[in-house]
Image (cartoon, rainbow, N blue to C red):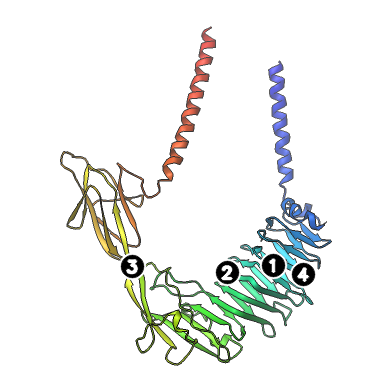
Amino acid sequence: MLKKRSLLLSVGLIALMGIFAVASFNDDPADAAPLAVGGSDLAAALDNAVSGAVITLDEDAVLSRDATIKSGVTLDDGGFSLRISAYSTLYVEGTFASSGNLKIDSLGSVVIASDGLLSIDNEGTAAEVAGTIEISKDGTVCVGNRLKGNIECFSTGRLLVGGTMIVGCDALSSAVTARNAVVTGELRVSGGSVFKIQNSLTIGSSPTLTTDMENPAVIAGKITLENTAYVFVYGQPPSGQSGFTSSNLNHASLQTRFMAFEKVYATEYRSNTGNHTLVIPSTSDLIDWRLVRWEDTAGNVVTDANSIQIGSDGYKTIKGTFDKKTYRILFAEDKSIRWVVGPKVLGSTGEIEDVYGAKLIVSIRAAPGNTELPAIFIDGAPFASGTSFTVTGETIFTTANNYPTKDDGLVPILVIILAILLVILAISYTMLRMKEKKKAD
């Protein structure tokens, strides 16, 4: 009887815990109400907020640890100052309405996630950014959503636009000043608003293939360059899409194009009254070709040491000379077989090199004294002996006798899982034996 009561009590407690869990995670907006919080309670309030909640500051606040404005949650700074301290990140998955003085310390950041929104309506002041504002894909920042908005990214401040940034949403005469900014998404600057660059604006990302150097970034409106600032644009826009051109600059400009295989690899711009030396583009992300050198129209090698101004005569077009990248193909040791690449027999192990795009036929044959052939794997995936593959990077061939080798980290994990299963089986077997022994007694 006592055992039955204990069982009923346990079931009841579990049921109560389930009801409590359901109540705690109820995200029905109808049950949420505006919540005014003090500065020291902000992170905790965000942690506990559910969809539909509106959290409003009633005093200046400092965020000294990571926190998230969850989807469906709104944080309104109420016109107060909100400081994001160093090594702290405010993730915006819902809405952050800033009408006060937003301050992001160096090494601090505000990250607008997919579907998140940051609206800046701080007329009379400015968001001071010594850290980072990062707009993820499908995230949005509206500067001047209702009132005029201002952002100043100074010193170590960075602006990373992977989603959408609109300067002057409804309120014109909004302004953003950034020392360094990167746009891989969309930047829209309305007429009457200002987007000013003090040092560098990079548009797009470095290509990985010379056959694919399209730049999907979208720029609309005018950008202002300070005297020593420049714009660096990778590639060209896709067909039918207008990307960045000199018409997106507020003042007349000069430019230099870097060409790879008759395609635009990068273009640099500076104001014709300003000054900035050429920035030699990095090609380290290319996986198909390796840069040998950049040359001017006269065939002279161009390097950073030349200190040539962007757009100078004779340097409006720079052409690159490239070699195909070479990669290693490794064949793991298996003494039961002989590796064969094309007509060449390597032995039980081996290593060769070939260029990107090369097609190689790999097969195996039995070593003397062996009859069965093991399965083959290429970078851990099954591979049929006698078929071809295309070189796109360093490659490892293995057999079932030594698989896997490229990611040996998988082996310890599997060993641990197997050990746990064996322990569970051992305990289960012991308990079963004890029960059988009790029954026998």
The reply to whether discs 3 and 1 touch (Cβ–Cβ < 8 Å) is: no
Q: Which one is earlier in the sequence, the residue at label 2 or at label 1?
A: 1
Report the front residue among 67 and 54.
67
The reply to whether discs 3 and 4 touch (Cβ–Cβ < 8 Å) is: no
Q: Amino acid at mark 4?
A: Asn
Circle 3 residues within 10 Å: few <14, some 14–19, many ≥20:
some
Report the front residue among 110 and 31.
110
Which residue appears at 45% of the width and 34% of the height? Answer: 418
Which residue appears at 51% of the width and 13% of the height? Answer: 436
**Alpha-carbon span between mark 3 and mark 1:** 43 Å
**Alpha-carbon span between mark 3 and mark 2:** 30 Å
Q: Position of residue 234 (x, y in %)?
A: 48, 77
Q: Does 395 appear above or below 322?
A: above
Which residue, given by chain and number where applicable, does mark 3 sit on? 325
Which residue, given by chain and number where applicable, does mark 2 sit on? 162
Which residue, given by chain and number where applicable, does mark 4 sit on? 101
The reply to whether discs 4 and 2 touch (Cβ–Cβ < 8 Å) is: no
Q: Amino acid at mark 2?
A: Gly
Which residue, given by chain and number where applicable, does mark 1 sit on? 118
**Alpha-carbon span between mark 3 and mark 4:** 51 Å
Q: Does 329 appear above or below 146?
A: above
Give the farthest residue toward the front.
305
Q: Which one is earlier in the sequence, the residue at label 3 or at label 2?
A: 2
**Alpha-carbon span between mark 2 and mark 1:** 14 Å
Q: Which one is earlier in the sequence, the residue at label 4 or at label 2?
A: 4
Q: Secondary structure at mark 2?
A: loop
Q: Amino acid at mark 3?
A: Lys
Which residue appears at 79% of the width and 54% of the height? Answer: 41
Q: Position of residue 415 (x, y in %)?
A: 43, 37
Which residue appears at 58% of the width and 92% of the height? Answer: 273
Q: Secondary structure at mark 3?
A: loop
